[in-house]
Amino acid sequence: MREPSGLRLEGVSRRYQGSGRGVEALSLDVRPGELLALIGASGSGKTTTLRMVAGYEPPDAGRIALVSAAGAERDITREPPQRRGFGMVFQHYALFPHMSVQENVAFGLEARRVPKAERLARATEALAGVGLAGYGPRAVQALSGGEQQRVALARALVIEPNVLLLDEPLSNLDPTLRQTTRDELREMLHRLHVTAMFVTHDQEDAFAVADRVAMLCAGRLEQVGTPEALYQAPASQVVAKFVGRGTFAPAAADGDTAIVTIGGVSQRAPLGSAHGTGDRWAVLRPESLTAVEPATGEAWHGTVQTRRFAGDHYVYRVGDIAGAAEPLEVMCEHGNFAEGDAVAVRLRPKPLALVAAQRAS
Amino acid sequence: MNKRFTGLAVAVLAILAWSVVYPNLSVVAGSFAHGGRDWLAFFQSPADHEALVNTLVIAVASVASALAVGVPLAFLLTRFEFRGRRFMSAVATLPAALPPLVGVIAFMFLYGESGVVTRGVQTLFGLAHPPWTFTGVWAIVFVHAYTMYVYVFLFVSAGLERYDTSLDEAAEGLGAPAALRLRRVTLPLLTPSLIGSMLLVFMSALGSFSAPYIFGGGARVLSTQILVSKLNGSMGMAYVETSMLVITAIVALAVLRWIERRREYAMSGKGRVTRTVVRSPFWRHAAPAVAALAVVFLVLPHAMVVLVSFARDGAWTTQVLPPQYTLDNFRRLATDPDLIQPITNSVSMAAIATAANVVVCFLAAYLLVLSRAPGKRLLGLLVALPWAIPATAIALGLAATFDRNALASAKLLLVGTFWILPLAYFVRNIPVVTNAIEGSLRQMDPTIEDAARGLGASWMLAMRRVVLPAARPGLVAGAMLAAVAAVGEFVASIVLYSHSNRPISMEILSQLRGLSFGTAAAYSVLLIALVLAITTGARWAESRMA
């Protein structure tokens, strides 16, 4: 197996007239063999980025290059898709409906003028690799969504792509299938040691599959890092909101302590990370908070609006807190509180992330 | 419920058997009236051999040239964005708006021996003779390419609109160069559109009458040969020729359907069209220029007919353009009773035929879609049959069958009467009208009718309040198509008309024979106006009822 190449995007831009959508000066490195997820809301530019990397859309500015393990760059900005040698899995899989499963998988080899016997043998092998041994002669319409997804993957992998691109590869699968498929996907891509970039609007998919996650918002890169980094140390409110539940409250950093103030009542917790300048907000994840019996001292007082059982813990939604813009979501190990109960909300002694405060969220 | 369906089915089948099957069987029977003698004569006659070969050559060449024009144009207009694209798209279907004979006449005015373009080129280069003679097989194919590429263009454009372009992108990403993508992915996936349009072109070219009749020169084809035999009184031979034409049509139908069936599959995913903006500096300027040229070529026939309609009869002899212009032609169409009669004939015959089509075809479509009546397969076959039979053959069948009153053999004397032409128009339009209504009814949830009946509605009430409203778009579209086809009909008319019921098309032909080009063109303009009025009226009716 050959060494995978990395991918380098430098100041890549693509603007659509009038729509305000597109990608603005995006710079991003995907290391050889790395699985990078591109996440963001719809219209954030993630699919446009993927299509530019694949070569289906030309960037208006910037440069896209393949980087070998030794560090040598090959500029592919102007290369047409068929010469990039990338494998792509489309959102709706784009399987050729007039070809059998095997012919679909062998098509990339046909384009490379691999003799028929060899390409069919390699297609069979690739199908076995995705757990579809014996599916070759079937019609693609006869397959389930999950099977189609694997055929699309086999078709993209059989050409031994420089980079594998996946556009929402899991979005067409039902929830149970989705969970097993994404574990398999990660396992398979790691085993093959292939560089992959995949687009998803689902943060859970991204966290489950990717080594690193890049979040786009309105065509700009908000943050790139490990899933842990994005969750625990979000660079902005947008990232914090996208990658998990939580509410925001005014806060300040004092050395390695974060001070969160709601309605004039301040509470302290260790400072985990602080991004941005000026006014700051703390990212209050449900697990950063706990609810106790109403008591005096540093606590935010409110009433339980809803109570949700989540397996080994409970999540309370606590409203009517003086000075709070919205109810707080609080995680508790016990279910002792009922809806309507008065409670006090306390910060747990866990690192808190601070982000720059935004006027409009 | 079932009894009612059965009664209805029997009635509709009886009408179709009488008007569609019986005449064609009469033709086959007629071809054997002298034993096998007429068949033997057909296969020994060099003229008929030539006609058969010419007919096939013309049909195949028409399909090839319609594909050559229609497919690239459909790709250009659905896949690319350039200046003038929208206008070009609007104009691309113009040739379909020309009634059959009118298109041919326009080509005669333009490219015929004394046509404007012919004389223009001759004068420009000071040639002693016209630069070309616009006659024979290739002239016919040229006219067919102009009028019939529209089928290919429309079918392939529709196919491309439904096409999921990510399939092409997938092939591209897998390393397939453009030629391989086209050969292995795009074209195979467009097979249904391609075959559908090829069938339509092949059938139209096979049965085409006006182009061979006007531009044939010495070249014989089966459809004109049939008329010659009939006029010579060799009815047996006419029947043999008609049978051969029908056999050719049915074989072609079977072959193309067989190819289509081998390629059956459903398009997965949704259609997604992305238009590539033309960026290369050469094509950014060349594309609009080429488009403009094409537009001129497409509009020229219409413009020519309009121009000549203002030419004074008899004044246009050797000049490039008609020298004198007048409103007289139109004035006479409006005042001379002899010239008005073809207009009232065409309009009333088209109206009668269309009304009959709407009623019978609605019942047929209703039975086909919503009933479990016995004989549905047979019914489906019968309503499609006139489509596979060239119009000349349909006309000859009617002539062979309805030539005397004989109740015992279900024959009526219609030949020579007013009623023979409405009947012919009715038969020709059965497939298209039924198809349109069927399309609408198939979109209706069949349980709706059951629901209405379950709520206590009588069959009539359910029909009036539920089924008819669902069928409405198809009824309007079908009536429009039938009326447009009937008002300009030429091919069956020339076989069956008599002086008292001569339609506009026949009057155009007789004016041309009398060299009254201006009057012929004025009729043509009137015909185009009628077609426009019908289509606009249908669109208005549909929007008002929706």
Image (cartoon, coloured by chain):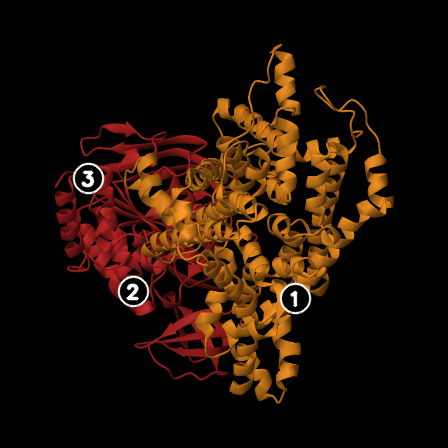
Chain colours: A red, B orange
> Which residue is found at the position 26% from the left and 41% from the top?
A163
Residue named by callout 1: B356
Residue occupying image coordinates x 48% and y 83%: A339
**What amino acid type should be assigned to the residue bearing mark 3?**
Pro
Mark 2 against mark 3, which lies toward the viewer?
2
- The residue mark sitting in front, 3 or 1, is 1
* Label 3: how many Cα within 10 Å (few below 14, some 14–19, many 20+): many
Q: Quadrant of the C terminus of chain B?
A: bottom right
Residue at disc 3, secondary structure:
loop
The mark tally for this picture is: 3
Amino acid type of disc 1? Ala
The residue identified by callout 2 is A144
Residue holding disc 3 = A4
In the image: residue B328, left or right of residue B441: right
Q: Quadrant of the N terminus of chain B?
A: bottom right
Q: Position of residue B6 (x, y in %)?
A: 52, 82
Furthest residue in direction bottom, as rendered: B456
Q: Camera-side residue: A272 or B414?
A: B414
Measured Cα–Cα span from mark 1 to mark 2: 49 Å
Q: Residues within 10 Å of mark 2 (few under 14, many from 20)?
A: few
The answer, for residue A158, to whether it is visible in the render is yes
* Residue found at x 49% / y 66%: B382
Q: Position of residue A209 (x, y in %)?
A: 27, 55
